[in-house]
Image (tube, coloured by chain):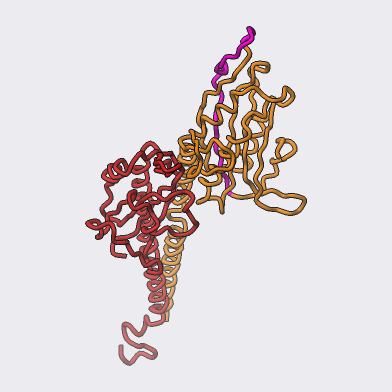
Chain colours: A orange, B red
């Protein structure tokens, strides 16, 4: 009887060890590769943001408003259109930041929406052009172009909405806070050189490069979610 | 010994202890089998992902494709043998969500390493319902020099397109 008890106790101990081992194996199985998968996904999003921005910068666009590239009589690099638009003096002194508008803004928006199609069902995005301040307000950053498509709560109606915005002044800090809050999964930034046409003081005009080189174009991608930091009024969106 | 009451023999005496032993061993081998299978499957997934990244990196180059010769040259840089793949370009306007087939890709801007390599006009058929297919399809934006007919003349313009890379397991 004692021998039988000892054998059962041994077997139960053995079962306990096996149960521990099996649990360890099971935990290992369920967690195996999660980090690698997350890294692969992160790497894909990051690469996507870089290649998307490259494609936007390389692509041609129609120089006329509604035309597609396949029908437009005149086409140019999209970045050229943006630079031209920015170089032209502002129409209104009161709104010096609204500089990338009209054809270039529409073509840029069309291009962005097209390029983001494969990932737009699960992601929101924003493209911005940041420029050093105009000659009057040198040193101050402004945003002549900002386009975003994101989940927006319009008085209880939550839906994907596109916005053109023209924020100014201290917006850089707000943008950084937004990127952190949105938990961006992909971000790509490329420095660009913007020039402006200015009055040379003797009745003519000249093209000058902005003194500092902090001008850039950026693309930010994040998983679709409601980001409270976004405020159309604060960001001066249309 | 045989006259002792309740004695069932050397094995019979330990019979009750054999039940937890067998039970423990069954659990162990079941979990071991599950672990082994999961490990194999996920390793294969990583292999597919890595290959898709390698192929896309080789084909993306500078992010601009100037001609079909340029693309063919880039295809020559791909060194993936353990897995089947096909890759190619599709116009951004023609893209629709879901799985992109070989036939949907631009005929001059596609390549593969499948058995149909000798005759790339033969479409590759992949049975998407097949078990253990472990198919990975990655899409990247890319700028491609494309011919457009403008006012009766052929004009080359740089159009946004997508590079599609599809990788699956040999023999799946």
Q: Nearer the viewer, residue A108 or A64?
A: A64
Looking at the image, the residue that sits furthest to the front is B152
Q: Position of residue A204 (x, y in %)?
A: 61, 11
Nearer to me, A1 or A116: A116
Identify the residue shown where x is 27% and y is 58%: B114
Span highlighted in magenta in the image? A200-223
Image location of residue A213, percent across then percent down: 54, 20
In the rendered view, does B122 fall on the left or right side of A52? left
Residue A206 located within the stretch drawn in magenta: yes
Question: What residue is rendered at 48% in x and 33% in y?
Answer: A77
Q: Residue at x 32, y 65 (%)?
A: B172
Rendered view: B166 above or below A169? below
Measuring 56% from the left and 39% from the top, which residue is drawn there? A107
| A141 relative position to B117: left or right | right
Q: Is residue A160 above or below residue B1?
A: above
Single out the residue that lies furthest toward the top: A202
Question: Is residue A166 one of those drawn in magenta?
Answer: no
Residue A149 appears at what percent x and percent y?
Answer: 62, 45
Asked whether the viewer can see residue B86, the reply is yes
Residue A211 position (above or below residue A146): above
Residue A36: percent from left, percent from top: 43, 49
């Amino acid at each position: 009887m004692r021998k039988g008890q000892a054998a059962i106790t041994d077997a139960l101990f053995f079962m306990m060890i096996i149960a521990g081992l099996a649990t360890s194996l099971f935990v290992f199985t369920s967690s195996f590769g999660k980090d690698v998968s997350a890294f692969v996904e992160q790497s894909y999003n990051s690469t996507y943001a870089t290649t998307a921005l490259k494609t936007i910068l390389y692509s041609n666009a129609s120089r006329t408003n509604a035309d597609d590239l396949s029908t437009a009589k005149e086409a140019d690099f999209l970045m050229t259109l943006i630079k031209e638009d920015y170089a032209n003096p502002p129409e209104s002194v009161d709104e010096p930041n609204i500089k990338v508008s009209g054809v270039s803004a529409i073509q840029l928006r069309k291009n962005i929406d097209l390029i983001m199609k494969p990932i737009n069902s699960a992601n929101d995005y924003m493209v911005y052009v940041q420029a050093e301040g105009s000659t009057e307000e040198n040193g101050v950053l402004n945003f002549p172009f900002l386009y975003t498509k994101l989940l927006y709560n319009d008085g209880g109606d939550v839906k994907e909405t596109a916005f053109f915005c023209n924020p100014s002044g201290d917006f850089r800090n707000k943008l950084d806070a937004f990127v952190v809050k949105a938990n961006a999964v992909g971000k790509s930034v490329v420095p660009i050189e913007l020039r402006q046409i200015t009055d040379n003081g003797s009745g003519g005009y000249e093209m000058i490069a902005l003194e500092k080189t902090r001008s850039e174009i950026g693309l930010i991608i994040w998983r679709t979610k409601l980001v409270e930091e976004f405020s159309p009024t604060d960001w001066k969106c249309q | 010994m045989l006259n002792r009451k309740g004695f069932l023999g050397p094995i019979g005496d330990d019979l009750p202890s054999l039940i937890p032993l067998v039970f423990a061993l069954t659990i162990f081998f079941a979990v071991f089998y599950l672990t082994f299978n999961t490990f194999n499957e996920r390793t294969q997934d990583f292999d597919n992902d890595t290959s898709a990244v390698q192929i896309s990196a080789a084909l993306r180059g500078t992010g601009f494709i100037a001609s079909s010769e340029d693309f063919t040259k880039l295809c020559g840089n791909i060194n993936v043998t353990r897995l089947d793949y096909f890759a190619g370009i599709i116009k951004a306007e023609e893209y629709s969500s879901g799985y992109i087939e070989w036939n949907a890709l631009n005929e001059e801007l596609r390549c593969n390493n499948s058995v149909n390599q000798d005759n790339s006009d033969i479409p590759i058929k992949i049975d998407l319902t097949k078990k253990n297919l472990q198919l990975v399809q990655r899409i990247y934006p890319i700028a491609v020099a494309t011919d457009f007919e403008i006012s009766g003349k052929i004009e080359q313009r740089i159009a946004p397109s997508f590079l599609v890379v599809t990788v699956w397991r040999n023999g799946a």
